[in-house]
Amino acid sequence: MFETRILSKDRIADELERMGCDPRGVEIMAPKGTYRLIRASGLDPRAANILKQEFLAAGAEAAVSWAALNVSEDESEVIMMGTLSHYRRVLRKLEEQPLGLPNLSEEVKTALKNFDDPAEPPVPGEGTRVMGILNVTPDSFYDGGVNYDLDRAIERAQDMVGEGADIIDIGGESTRPGSGRVSVEDEIDRVLPVIDSLVDKIDVPLSIDTHRPKVAEAAVDAGASMINDVYGLRDEGMRETVATLDVPVVIMHMQGTPETMQDDPRYDDVITEIYRYLRNRASQAEEAGISPSNIIIDPGIGFGKRIHHNLEIISRLEEFNSMGYPVLLGASRKSFLGQVLDKKADERLYGSLAVAALAVQKKVGILRVHDVHETVDVVRTIQAMMRDR
């Protein structure tokens, strides 16, 4: 009797080796079993048609609009569909074509490399790092007031390190929906004593959660070695300050501000719009002198998004890897989980862990979480299964 089963798409090389194929044969055949969809935009419609023909000639496919086929639009999008083997053949051909197609070939090569081998976060650790949240605020959505006392904040940070945190993220201003701003002086007064006290007490990097140049500078001078900016380096002088400080920085997407972001968030294409925003912000950061190796991107779960936006972002997280920067995800106990589960913030642990498990599989670089011990167990378990492939 025959035995037939469908293989997991990411096990092709292992299965070929198990079957006893020649190593050179594995090297040749594995790319034929790895399929990729790539979207490209901004093409001359004539280039889009050439691209389509090259993919068809290689035995693959590329989709373009009717308007592109009729050359009746100024720019065209293309969705390429093929195995890695198809891409290798087509990309070689594109190097000989006009209309910017050699440049597209290089961009596709880079995107494929970034997708299959995501950038590592610029902090010590292996695989997905866990960032523990330490809000020294009276009004954060989940832990507001809990760590407002200095001694309690120090104790909680030490506990999180003991639970396996790779980074501690210290915030002195709430960014929950509807929250107002505090003064620069108040924010500094909240975070600096914590950083001063922790810098010699724990052996993991300290991150400062701020969008203000003065706070970032004071925090790094005190011993913080990373900046987490939920405003995406919008504040005047922030890019230049980060470049001068020369530390890793998280650039997050947010539609609006914390005061207004959940009033009426709308997107035509949520993934594309966030991707373009982050790519633009990262380019501006590099132009200001920030090293590409110091840039981390964050799609901003819950920051100007409805429940379906958040769920789509999480289900398609791996697409952000193709940009070439490590990805940070902060979904811990957020309100979209409350909507999914119909539960309050203190009852959303298991929902948060489900998101964390999926994020590790999608090779997210950093998970920003309230529940360090539980998340570290999830990360280690998923990574062990991934290493066994």
Image (tube, rainbow, N blue to C red):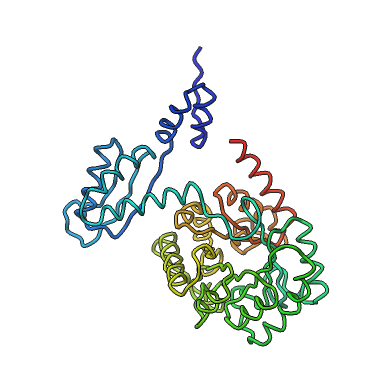
In the rendered image, the residue lying farthest to the top is 1
Q: Is residue 60 left or right of residue 31?
A: left
When the figure is inspected, residue 112 is found, relative to residue 44, above or below; the finding is above
Residue at image location 51% in from the left, 72% down from the top: 232
Of residue 106 and residue 372, the one placed in the foreground of this image is 106
Of residue 114 and residue 235, the one placed in the foreground of this image is 114
User: Exactly how many numbered labels are in the figure?
Assistant: 0
Residue at image location 31% in from the left, 39% down from the top: 89
Q: Is residue 273 left or right of residue 147?
A: left
Residue at image location 45% in from the left, 69% down from the top: 286
| Quarter assignment of residue 130 | bottom right
| Quarter assignment of residue 24 | top left
Q: Is residue 328 visible?
A: yes
Of residue 245 and residue 279, the one placed in the foreground of this image is 245
On the image, the x and y values in percent for residue 318 come to 50, 51
When the figure is inspected, residue 261 is found, relative to residue 74, above or below; the finding is below
On the image, the x and y values in percent for residue 139 come to 69, 76
On the image, the x and y values in percent for residue 365 come to 58, 55
Quadrant location of the C terminus in the rendered image:
top right
